[in-house]
């Protein structure tokens, strides 16, 4: 369903996984990776959204720093991923999202879905780019809750996530009460299929809610 393509951005080229539906797309999505790269899991997520009728680009954000990054889900991978996030910077990440959105525009209205670090970039895509977005367990979100989104945002959090305390989730409710927020009996990365963190009932329900949100906001 998907294949690699090259995405031209204002800061240079990055690879992007391009997944297309079997029928004409009903809208388009930028899928935003975790700190581990545009790996097999993220590509499968993109393919899944294409299967739901969306044209999807999942950029390899770290290509602007180091090409072909796919990190292991271990402490070393997490440390290296955080280093790459720091080296890339938020502005460059948003430039990549904007470039992907421009490419996808012929397919219809464009939104984003992001996970972990990507969940925070998805929030910022709504705040600064005006793209309806779904933010999964964005641990860096709280730094940006003082900014007013230009588009709707949906938040998904695991109530057992040690990286996002209950106080941080509550800040979302207080600062952005107009946005939908859901908690699940799960930890961080509960959507990461094939991983010990995966919690299938929570992932399934979050996906259902995400698809409803996208159907309503990307008409």
Image (cartoon, rainbow, N blue to C red):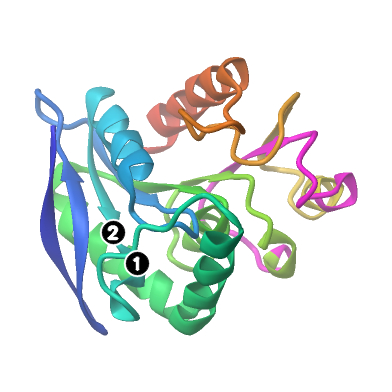
Number of marks: 2
Judge whether residue 159 is colored magenta: yes
Residue at (35, 67) in percent of width and height: 61
Between 77 and 93, which is closer to the camera in this rendering?
77
Q: Quadrant of the C terminus?
A: top left
Residue 21 shown left or right of residue 172 in the figure: left
Residue 192 shown left or right of residue 37 in the figure: right
In this rendering, the answer to whether 28 lies above or below 67 is above
The secondary element bearing badge 2 is classed as strand
Q: Whole-percent x and y of residue 120?
A: 58, 59
Residue annotated with mark 2: 59
User: Which region shows up in magenta?
Assistant: 145-168
In this rendering, the answer to whether 15 lies above or below 152 is below
Residue 124 shown left or right of residue 107 in the figure: right
Residue at (46, 28) in percent of width and height: 194
Report the residue that reaches farthest toward the right.
167
Residue annotated with mark 1: 61
């Amino acid at each position: 369903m998907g294949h690699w393509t090259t995405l031209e951005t204002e800061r240079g080229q990055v690879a992007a996984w391009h997944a297309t539906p079997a029928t004409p797309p009903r809208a388009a999505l930028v899928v935003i990776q975790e700190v581990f790269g545009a790996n097999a899991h993220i590509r499968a997520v993109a393919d899944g959204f294409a299967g739901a009728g969306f044209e999807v680009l999942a950029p390899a954000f770290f290509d602007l720093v180091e090409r072909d990054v796919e990190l292991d889900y271990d402490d070393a991978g997490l440390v290296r991923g955080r280093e790459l996030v720091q080296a890339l910077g938020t502005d460059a990440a948003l430039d990549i999202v904007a470039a992907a959105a421009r490419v996808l525009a012929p397919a219809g209205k464009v939104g984003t879905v992001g996970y972990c670090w990507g969940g925070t970039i998805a929030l910022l895509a709504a705040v600064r780019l005006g793209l309806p977005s779904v933010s999964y367990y964005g641990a860096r979100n709280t730094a940006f809750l003082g900014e007013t989104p230009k588009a709707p945002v949906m938040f998904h959090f695991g109530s057992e996530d040690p990286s996002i305390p209950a106080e941080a989730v509550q800040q979302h409710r207080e600062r952005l009460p107009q946005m939908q927020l859901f908690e699940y009996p799960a930890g961080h990365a509960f959507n990461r299929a094939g991983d010990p963190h995966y919690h299938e009932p929570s992932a399934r329900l979050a996906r259902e809610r995400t698809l409803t949100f996208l159907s309503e906001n990307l008409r």
